[in-house]
Image (spheres, rainbow, N blue to C red):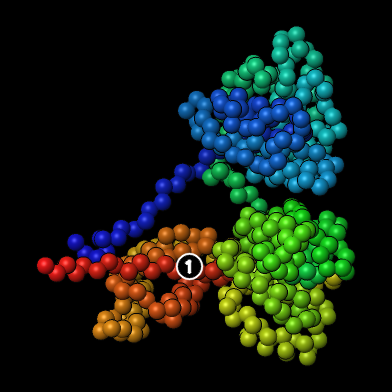
Amino acid sequence: MTDEETWPELASDERGPVPTVAVVGRPNVGKSTLVNRILGRRAAVVQDEPGVTRDRVAYDAEWAGKEFSLVDTGGWDPDAEGMARSIALQAELAMRTADVIVFVVDSRVGPTDADEAAVKILRTTKKPVVLVANKVDSERQESEIHELWSLGLGEPFPISALHGRNSGDLLDKIVWAFPEVPTGALKERGPRKVALVGRPNVGKSSLLNRIAGEERAVVDNVAGTTVDPVDSLVEIDGEDFVLVDTAGLRKRVKFASGTEYYAALRTEAAVEAAEVALVLLDASEQISEQDQRVLTQVTESGRAMVLAFNKWDLVDDDRRYYLEKEIDRELGQVSWAPRVNVSATTGRAVEKIARALREALGGWGQRISTGELNQWISALQAATPHPVRANKAPKVIYATQAAAEPPRFILFTNAPFEKQYLKFIQRKLREDFGFPGTPIDLVVKPRESRKRPKK
């Protein structure tokens, strides 16, 4: 058996694309009860008070031999504020990313202003919509749902999610609406999620408002105005992104206290939940230790990264010269991150942010086949072998990319490797394959010694 056969390639067993069905509607119309009815078990939390479901939650479902992803959402309200606004945003994302939308209304209340506002969004999605009139517990009540025709979504389908009335027929109707080719693959990803991070007062909220074209975040010259992460669905250069404005990071979480401690925790969680971090730096000021701390946190989180130098309208020729020197000296560890020079005040180059985000996300999800990787590593070692240590020449016997997002490589070796040689491999990986905007993780697994014990 060869060394290569000792470590077979790590294979992934991923399910192919399945249709995605989003259950949406305003609060307390019975969406989670319907989800539980379709699943045949109590999976979604149900209470009499509105607003219990706060995020998109996906479940595996099946009907008549057809598998699909069923997405429960929080209540959608066009006038929501605070936490409710974030909940509404998640419901809106579900509407835009589903293959089929199940729009649930309360038959006993009839069409409301919130329902009509939701219909306007539903029409823009150009997805099939099944209008469900819930809480119709008897045939007599079916005659009372004619008002729902005014929503303009066709015939309302009467059901009782609580008692299961007509639920089978509803599932037939949903399955019939599936597209021939699902756009799903669980389609949970939807718009890419971007954490807007940086030290206090670098202009994160101002940039969010500039991109959104409206006041979505409070802006003040006093550092630390933003405390809670704020989710906003925005369009940059023709593509939707979810931007999360976060509190400015002053200290490490363990050294913070009071409100600052919890703000730092929430910011840390926002970075972990995002796919890419847009790190803002103040181009008009020197790169600080706080900036370095933010960059380290994002790199350690394994997220893709884009550097945005804000307040470029305040940068003159002298500052530009010194800034380039600072970047070379202070940001060498993240030289792989795409850079864009912007101004939240004037709107300069804001559309270029989308291009940089796409580039970073592309590198974050990049893969190299095992065959190509091993050919490359063999040629690299032949040209530049690892220095001999203790009369032994360490070398990679077999390599594989175990994961993406971020890229993670496992190197099976005949001996431990020095850090400097690993940095050399990492640098050559970037030179030959790219991997822009993403940290790269190299894991070395030395082969165990085969020496026989002395008798």
Q: Which residue lies furthest to the front in this view?
A: 455
- Quarter of the figure with residue 398: bottom left
Judged left or right of residue 445, residue 442 is right
Residue 245 in sight here? no
State the quadrant of the N terminus.
bottom left
Counting from the top left corner in percent of width and height, residue 427 is at: 48, 78
Counting from the top left corner in percent of width and height, residue 65 is at: 47, 28
Disc 1 crowd rating (10 Å Cα; few below 14, some 14-19, many 20+) is: some
Picture residue at 87% right of the left edge, 68% below the top: 222
**Residue in front for this viewpoint, 42 or 208:** 42
Counting from the top left corner in percent of width and height, residue 430 is at: 49, 75
SS under mark 1: strand
**Residue in front for this viewpoint, 338 or 304:** 304
Q: How many labels does the image show?
A: 1
Counting from the top left corner in percent of width and height, residue 359 is at: 60, 67
Picture residue at 71% right of the left edge, 31% below the top: 103
**Residue topped by disc 1:** 441
Q: Is residue 320 above or below residue 68?
A: below
Query: In the image, what residue type sits under mark 1?
Result: Asp
Q: Which residue lies furthest to the top in this view?
A: 140
Picture residue at 28% right of the left edge, 81% below the top: 393
Picture residue at 80% right of the left edge, 15% below the top: 144
- Quarter of the figure with residue 280: bottom right
Judged left or right of residue 308, residue 447 is left
